[in-house]
């Protein structure tokens, strides 16, 4: 989730909070005008203005938390739990996913205001133990509601993160009190009260260093916990080769800037505007005769150029061979490998080529589809490229099929949610289950650093389901 997406999401959630706090502040203003300022100096007020304002902010904060955790959420996780401590962070590391890490950080930040506001509102919450008790109880109450209502999972990680957030807020409160009291910032107080963000920062810094030192990226298929295979009836029908194998690793090469520059040069287009969403980009271009095109480019390297106002019509060419040669010439000019691809179809003036997805050892290769769309007069109305350019890196040693089977025996694999009909119970490996391995075949997938790496696809029958499969990192 990008910074812009986060801002827009928080803006939507913030509107009800602003309305609630605004109404509360109107009542506070009325209290001040009609009672507080008119009382005699000796008369003790019903409530201090500080507590009223803090109370209004606290209520707004509670509304915000309820919107995030309770209000308007679906019911797709009824009675589901994730009791693995720090499982979310381990999974985020396995995927090296910023979005996954953000979820943990958001859960910490969500409870920071509670750790600040409670001790400001009441002296009894200036005792750390009482504040901690409230934070933990509030978190457990939210998790319990989500579990029984189906609004979310009961996750130990959420309890840990929310508690850390409450403690962090309390530490920030203590730091502010220390600065106000001593009229200066004490280094000891600064370090002790910023211990949690310092530790989190060091942790992420160390993870970043380790990740960048690795040759290859992370594979999301790597399981972060083991299944207990005791009592599971596991078998295999094929004979498994115990000898290790080797396979190539490739690197996806994405050339966004080169593609845009090449299109502008070859088709004589001028760029008018550019929009970006994370790693995706959309550009508006115009030709020298005023025809507008939209160029979309994805993070993976796929791109499409389409004429904005053109509606494809049934094309009937008087000389189809020359039109095919024209389409080939356009593709060749843009570096699309027609000489290595097979022409699949021609429909409404759109020529579609397809490349083999079989990696070739010791050489670069292309995979995917691309197309060129021509009007009857031979001019271009659209070009699309789903081609992946994979550069050969080196050969690596692989696990043998027998070693892969041993990993299944040890429970080191993921149960893959391959469709929405599978329930959580069907994805839990437990005593009495039947798993028969029918085959182990080599395939490839991209890791988090865009390396195209060999993985094993293990297929079989699980409790009568013949479509079961899992993926296991093939690297030794």
Image (cartoon, helix red, strand yellow):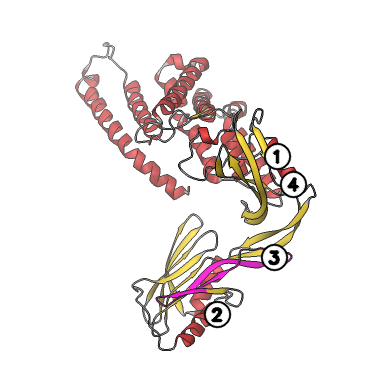
- Magenta segment, which residues? 344-371
Alpha carbon of mark 3 to alpha carbon of mark 4: how far?
25 Å
Q: Nearer the viewer, mark 3 or mark 4?
A: 4
> Upstream in the sequence, badge 1 or badge 2?
2
Residue 455: x and y in percent read: 66, 51
Q: Nearer the viewer, mark 1 or mark 2?
A: 1
Q: Nearer the viewer, mark 1 or mark 4?
A: 4
Q: Which mark is residue 360?
A: 3
> Upstream in the sequence, badge 4 or badge 2?
4
Query: Which residue is drawn at the image coordinates 61% and 54% (left, top)?
Result: 446
1 and 4 marks in contact (CB < 8 Å):
no
- Quick check: 13 left or right of 278? left
Circle 4 packing at 10 Å, graded few (<14), some (14-19), many (20+), is some
- Quick check: 426 left or right of 414? left
Secondary element at tag 2: helix
Q: Which mark is residue 333?
A: 2
Query: Which residue is drawn at the image coordinates 55% and 59% (left, top)?
Result: 300
């Amino acid at each position: 989730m990008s910074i812009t997406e986060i801002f827009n999401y928080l803006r939507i959630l913030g509107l009800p909070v602003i309305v609630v706090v605004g109404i509360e502040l109107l009542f506070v203003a009325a209290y001040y005008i009609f009672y507080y300022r008119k009382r005699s100096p000796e008369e003790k007020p019903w409530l201090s203005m500080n507590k009223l304002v803090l109370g209004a902010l606290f209520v707004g904060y509670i509304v915000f938390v309820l919107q995030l955790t309770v209000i308007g959420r679906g019911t797709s996780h009824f009675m589901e739990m994730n009791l693995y401590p720090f499982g979310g962070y381990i999974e985020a590391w396995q995927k090296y996913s910023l979005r996954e890490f953000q979820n943990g950080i958001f859960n910490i930040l969500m409870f920071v205001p509670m750790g600040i506001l409670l001790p400001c509102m009441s002296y009894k919450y200036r005792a750390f133990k009482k504040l901690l008790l409230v934070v933990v109880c509030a978190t457990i109450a939210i998790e319990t509601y989500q579990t029984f209502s189906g609004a979310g999972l009961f996750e130990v990680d959420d309890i840990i993160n929310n508690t850390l957030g409450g403690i962090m807020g309390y530490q920030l409160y203590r730091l502010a009190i220390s600065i106000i009291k001593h009229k200066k910032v004490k280094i000891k107080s600064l370090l002790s009260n910023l211990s949690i963000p310092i530790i989190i920062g060091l942790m992420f810094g160390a993870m970043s260093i380790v990740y960048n030192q690795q040759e290859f990226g992370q594979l999301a298929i790597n399981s972060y916990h083991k299944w207990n295979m005791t009592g599971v009836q596991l078998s295999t029908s094929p004979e498994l080769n115990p000898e290790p194998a080797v396979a190539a690793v490739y690197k996806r090469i994405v050339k966004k800037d080169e593609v845009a520059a090449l299109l502008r040069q070859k088709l004589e287009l001028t760029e008018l505007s550019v929009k970006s969403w994370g790693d995706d980009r959309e550009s508006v271009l115009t030709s020298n005769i005023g025809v507008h095109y939209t160029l979309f480019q994805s993070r993976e390297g796929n791109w499409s150029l389409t004429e904005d106002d053109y509606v494809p019509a049934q094309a009937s060419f008087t000389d189809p061979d020359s039109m095919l040669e024209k389409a080939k010439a356009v593709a060749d000019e843009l570096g699309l490998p027609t000489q290595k691809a097979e022409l699949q179809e021609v429909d409404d003036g759109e020529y579609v080529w397809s490349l083999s997805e079989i990696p070739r050892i010791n050489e670069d290769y292309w995979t995917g589809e691309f197309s060129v769309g021509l009007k009857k007069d031979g001019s271009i109305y659209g070009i699309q490229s789903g081609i992946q350019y994979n550069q050969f890196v080196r050969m690596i040693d692989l696990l043998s099929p027998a070693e892969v089977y041993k990993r299944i025996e040890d429970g080191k694999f993921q149960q893959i949610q391959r469709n929405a009909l599978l329930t959580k119970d069907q994805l839990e490996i437990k005593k009495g289950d039947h798993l028969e391995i029918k085959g182990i075949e080599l395939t490839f997938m991209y890791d988090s650093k865009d390396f195209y790496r060999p993985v094993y696809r293990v297929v079989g029958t699980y409790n009568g389901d013949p479509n079961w499969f899992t993926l296991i990192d093939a690297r030794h």
